[in-house]
Image (cartoon, rainbow, N blue to C red):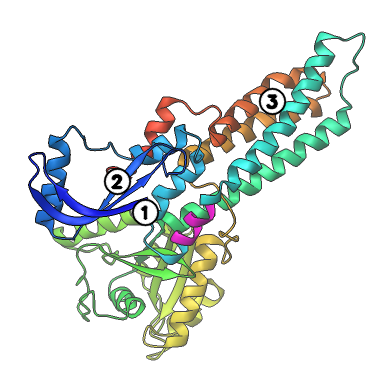
Amino acid sequence: MATYGTVVDENGAAIDRGIAILANAPRSYTGEDTLELQIHGSPVVAREVMRALLACGARYANAGEFSRRALLNGKMDVQEASAIADLIAAESRSAARAAAANLGGGIAREVRSLRARLAKILEELAAAIDFPDEVSDPDRAQLRSSLTGITNELRRLQRDGEAGRLIREGAGVAIVGPPNAGKSSLLNALLGEGRAIVSEIPGTTRDTIEETITVDGVPVRLIDTAGIREHADRLETAGIERTRRALSEARVAIVVLDGSEPLTPEARDVLALTADRPRVVFANKLDLGEAGARELGGRADVTGSVYDHATLEALRKALAKAGWGGELPDLERPHLAALFELDAVGEALGALDRALETLERGEPADLTAGELQRAFAALGHLTGDAAGEELLTQIFARFCIGK
């Protein structure tokens, strides 16, 4: 019910004209009686209305308190509550769409279905253990098939969840290479603006520069780094140390080399340094020559120039392939989002794998009961059926005040 009227303070003095909207339980966001005031947007008016409410006995809501009340009153599950926080924090369209997909409670329904299948298996095992003369052991082949099916579905949830996490948190990409290979020019070209200083003088970049772009819907944090070389002054050496740290923390590296000149010892060092990690080797400056590119041969993923549009498109595709396989699952279907959800699925998978190993060794089927019970309990954290106070605090700590 909406009522238009005058908002007064604790002494009856008028503050503003506005609308009061009353939502009666259970038809409200929290499932309780709630009152919403719509007032004019003046900071002074808003402050005075808040002061009057507090003077009349109200208090500020805790972080996430409205959503927490909604969860406790059965208006949403833990996935939906976590999705609200993700939606608020979304920094890209893909992240917002991925969060919105979890608002319908689809994950909880999937996990409850898997728990129901586990519960049926546990009931059969319990009956065989308690009444061995009347109830035979479950068929081992059928038991193995059932557990394998549950495991495969959990692994699919795990893969989709990791992809969703990538879209929410983004991928760190370190642009590395020897001095004067074109790292800063590449950063500027990908950004479409002159963010980093470009110079022919080696060692111009002394510190890391970080900017964000979007590649195939994934936020990518580009980190331009100092060139790596042996003979550097003390200040440049500090920048090189930051380069190594940025490289160790990045999901993938773009190795920029001067493809116009023969490979230098510094270029070979960078190739060796990044050999055991996801990377894109880019032979730059082919508008000036091809000596280095020919020397690299098949080791170069992309060849061309930072000033060429087709080269930049090829770099984006190579980056997506190296960073997340080039393809992401359909994130408009429900998927795991929070770290506690991925941890719970990982715990359940570990228990199921141990149960399957028990069967593979030919041991009695009833020895799997303990591991299956652990998997059943772990999945309970996903549905909220086993959500404790610590887990709820972890979820709602991410919310803004009140929401």
Task: Count residues near mark 1 (Cα–Cα under 10 Å), then give few for <14, some for 14-19, many for 20+.
Answer: some
Answer left or right for 142 relative to 57: right
* Callout 2: SS: loop
Where residue 211 sits in the image (x, y, percent)? Answer: 30, 66
Residue 93 against residue 117 in the figure, above or below: below
Answer left or right for 117 relative to 27: right
Q: Camera-side residue: 315 or 327?
A: 327
What residue type is disc 2 on?
Cys
Q: Earlier in the sequence, mark 1 or mark 3?
A: 1
Q: Which residue position holds label 3? A: 372
User: Do the CB atoms of the residues marked 1 and 2 lie less than 8 Å apart?
Assistant: yes
Q: Which residue position holds label 1? A: 88
Q: Is residue 310 visible?
A: yes
Answer left or right for 120 relative to 391: right
Label 1, label 3: how far apart the Cα atoms are: 36 Å
The label number, if any, that marks residue 6 in the structure image: none
Where residue 117 sits in the image (x, y, percent)? Answer: 74, 33
